[in-house]
Amino acid sequence: MEAKEVDKAHVAVDDFDPKIVAFCCNYCAYAAADLAGSMRLSYPPNVKVIRLPCSGKVEITYLLRALEDGADGVMVAGCLEGDCHFMEGNYRAKRKVRHAKRLLEEIGFESGRVEMFNLSSAMAGRFAEIMEEMTERIRKLGPSPLRKG
Amino acid sequence: MDEILEMLARYERILLLGCGTCVTVCLAGGEREVGILAGQLRIHARQEGKSAQVDEHTIERQCEKEWVEEIKDRVEGVDVVMSMACGVGVQLVAEMYPEKPVFPALNTTFMGYPAQHGIWFENCRGCGNCVLHLSGGVCPITRCAKSLLNGPCGGSQNGECEIDKEIECAWQVIYDRLKKTGRLEWMNNYQPPRDWSTAGSGGPRRSVKIEEVLD
């Protein structure tokens, strides 16, 4: 019985399909995702994209809530530094993500599950690459301790 | 954060209570900060394998009975109230719900203004005996590290305070301000030792506006 349970856990890790929530800026990452689709680039299907009017719109509570609700990883994708449609929204997002990591570290939670990325709307290849990178990172970290069920 | 976790360690059902007035504009204990701390508390508890119910609620003002009364049902449904108000709010909530433990989530620091978004400067101690009309609108009690009434001291160097180079010498600012407004001779006015009983040394203060008191 015990052995069976261990086996089950082992299989679960092997089959681990990380759930990732990506908060994407409308002007870059979201458009890059769209372009990646048009170009038929393949990237991990486990990423749920949420469109924001600007990465600066992200709130720390969005990131925490996504983790609470069972996301294994959360990312924010904004424009390249210096290229924000609203001048400095991506810098604000960067600071918020940095602060969210600090808040998670304070309570002993792996802050690597949260990350900020920058890309432009033309960088469809990079978008797919980022999704691979994040999925790989989360796969290494394993399922979130907050996963439901 | 460790201090907060320690305070709450024994309790399962928590009401995290924000205040919609001063601590909201100071980005310390409003609805947004309640959401963040509540998230942290829930994540921490679930990580530890504990069940924790963290209710989030923000009222307009925790320093007025009428607002605090309205949360009666919420308070009854929890084991502990963690207040994100200033010390005034925490005390009123504790006073109105004496059966319930009420803890402070913040260290209330000072009365000040935001010099820029995210940076605050202290500029009033509430000492109960204002001298701003004599000091060019700059409070020497608060902004002079020594609270000198007859300054500056010998530690004023190039407009900086000897306690910390980041602090402007309040008396340099007072001098400049008086000069600009043609009142420089006020620098020669001697301020006698003052009665600090109005500043709290005479015990907790109370204020009565008799015409406002309802029978």
Image (cartoon, grey):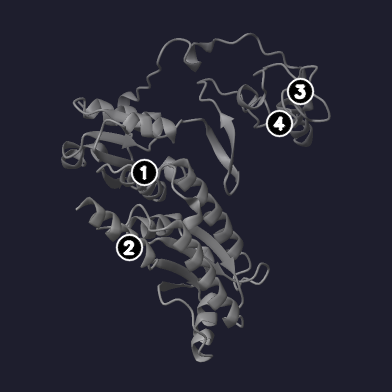
Judging by the rendered image, the residue that carries numbered circle 4 is B167
Tell me the residue at 50%/62% (across/down).
A137
Chain containing the residue with disc 3: B
How busy is the neighbourhood of tag 2: few (under 14 within 10 Å), some, or many (20 plus)? few
Is A119 left, or right, of B61 in this rendering? right
Q: Position of residue B10 (x, y in %)?
A: 27, 30
Q: Nearer the viewer, mark 1 or mark 2?
A: 2
**Mark linked to residue A12:** 2
Residues indicated by labels 1 and 2 sit on the same polypeptide chain: no
Judging by the rendered image, the residue that carries numbered circle 3 is B162
Q: Earlier in the sequence, mark 3 or mark 1?
A: 1
**Mark linked to residue A72:** none
Q: Nearer the viewer, mark 3 or mark 1?
A: 1
Q: Position of residue A54 (x, y in %)?
A: 52, 70
Q: Three-letter amino acid code at disc 2?
A: Ala
Q: Give the SS element for disc 2.
A: helix
Between marks 4 and 2, how big is the CA–CA gap? 58 Å
Between marks 1 and 4, how big is the CA–CA gap? 39 Å
